[in-house]
Amino acid sequence: MSSVITGKVWKFGDNIDTDVIIPGRYLTIRDPIQMASHAFEPIRPNFTKEIAAGDIIVSGSNFGSGSSREEAPFVLKTVGIAAIVAPSFARIFYRNAINLGIPLLELKNAPEYFEEGDIVEINSEEGTIKNLTQNVTYQGTKLPSFLMEIINAGGAIAAIKERIKRQRGQ
Amino acid sequence: MSTIVEKILAAHSDRAKVEAGEIIEANVDLVMLTEQLGRRIYRDWDELEGVIEDVWDKSKIVCVLDHWVPAPHIDAAEIHKICRVFAKKHEFSHFLDMFAGICHQIMVEKFVKPGMLVVGSDSHTVTYGALNAFSTGFGATDIVICMATGRNWFKVPETIKIDLNGTLPPLVYGKDIILRLIRDLTVEGADYKSMEFAGPAISDLSIDSRLTICNMSVEAGAKCGVFPPDEKLMDYFRTLYPNSTESLNFVTPDSDALYNEEIYLNVNELNPQVAKPHSPQNSVDVTEVEGTTINQGFIGSCTNGRMEDFRIAAQILKEKHTHPDVRLIITPASREIYSQCLNEGLMKIFIEAGAMITNPTCGACIGGHLGVLASKEVCISTSNRNFQARMGHVESQIYLANAATVAASVLEGVITDPRKYIE
């Protein structure tokens, strides 16, 4: 997995909770694509029709608050979101997104630096976010190396498989 | 110089002492999972086929079906079936199907003990801190890792000390304390942190109220909420395990523990609180929202579906009837509580008051079934989240309150201060 991502910005506000990312009533849908088609439906009903694979979310603080539903980062990954930039993330969402291999970058005052539709280039290894539209680069918080390993493996399950195999000398 | 959580985390790691900010590997005592993440958990598990032979410890996994029970549609039924097959295949000692109640209530009735480190596949796993344990919510992948290895990584949280002083006024409960704290802290004020409760007012709080407080600590972003032990907690365990000779591992903070922040709350001055739509941080005194028209009242959930809640609700509803335009839904948090309500005659009072009584489930609280809201409808609820669309239509509204306030409100058809019903 390449650590450099280029995509278009989608902006959201503060305290975006998991019930607006994917409402509870859609969690029983068995087809992942169909479930993901309801992402952000309560606040942005056309989101999944307009987004392109590789796009990036820039949000206000405490992104992903609320329930432990891993479906929240899962539907975002399924519709093609490649990274999320916010001043802070709710803790369960943080773990869940990393575990699914989605890079999260903490950047203070992030919403002030990006307009909806700006094109940005993210280096998740370095924690840098370059606004190509405005030609300014920002330094976000770097992920600790053991979390970067998970991102690079494509998720925690893949990472743990690699680790166990390594321990067994396979 | 350690807080309660630092002590519990250190005891479960290979370290004598841990400090806030450190990342450690720790062993878990119990893993709780429900069907909500069940399907993802079992799919992830299949990916480990060939690498992991079996779960780490069959006797330390508690699996509960509670979110959509009994199944309201085929999709939920299929998820339940997947969970049953998996639990049987791996011979879980504690697969409780849909027969015991809401996972968190079952955990505090049957499994959690002081000093334990417990993780669960639901954000309200934080509830068990009321029993002097460290407990926190994980998503599916982290649960799979715990099921496979009995371990996971934890960042030792900074701790906010919440000093509760004074004595509780009538009809003010744990719910009102935590709603007030969430307003003061905001929904992100305790992000990643532990909320450790202290102070003389604790002894005034029932275990039920403490469970409510810890349950909603996650609504301030907290990684956990935790209470120190006291005589009431010891009594709780004596009642649960009357014949046990096992000594319990109560954990107290050191007098020189380092806190990131200290908050002082005098509960004397607290009124019943109501959180307005669409955030738990929007709480105000009930008097400020009195008169707001409601369509539904809900008393239940892992937050407030316990005996303290049903006893006060019954006291208010006794020999009265709900307003003709309002429906009241009662959902006990567990079968034990359902049964106790029957024994005490509370169910008869609820039925005569016009209530609908459901089986224990997360149903109405998560907008799954048994109480979904239509557009423009307003619900006053004892549950934990009033996020937009949580209980149904995107244009519905939820007010959060204690059980007394919900009971008084369903009688009048508008949000009502319960203190007019009880002197």
Image (cartoon, coloured by chain):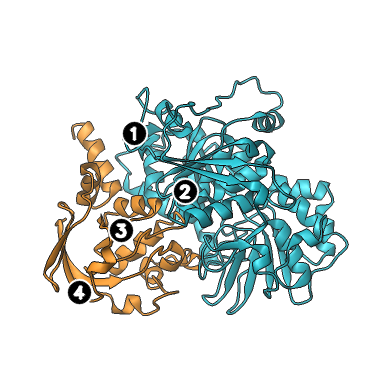
Chain colours: A orange, B cyan
- Label 1, label 4: how many angstroms apart (C-alpha)? 40 Å
Query: Does label 2 or label 1 sit earlier along the sequence?
Result: 1
Q: Can residue B82 be seen by looking at this rendering? A: no
Residue designated by label 2: B121
The answer to whether residue B95 shows anywhere in this view is: yes
Q: How crowded is mark 4: few (under 14 residues within 10 Å), some or many (20 or more)?
A: some
Count of marks, rendered view: 4
Crowd tier of the residue under label 2, counting other residues whose Cα lies within 10 Å: few below 14, some 14–19, many 20 or above: many
Gap in angstroms between the C-alphas marked 2 and 3 = 26 Å
- Left or right of B117: which side holds A39? left
Q: Is residue B206 left or right of residue B55?
A: right
Looking at the rendered image, the disc whose residue lies closer to the viewer, 4 or 3, is: 3
- Give the amino acid type for the residue marked by disc 1 in the picture: Glu
Residue shown at the point (38%, 58%) measured from the top left: A62
Mark 4 and mark 3: span between their CA atoms? 18 Å
Nearest to the observer: residue B258 or residue B311: B258
Q: How crowded is mark 1: few (under 14 residues within 10 Å), some or many (20 or more)?
A: some
Residue occupied by mark 3? A87
Classify mark 1: helix, strand or loop: strand
Q: Spatial distance from mark 3 to mark 1, Cα to Cα? A: 26 Å
At mark 4, the secondary structure is loop
- Subunit that carries the residue with mark 1: B
Question: Mark 2 to mark 1: distance in Å?
Answer: 19 Å
Marks 2 & 4 on one chain: no
Q: Name the residue under label 1.
A: B25
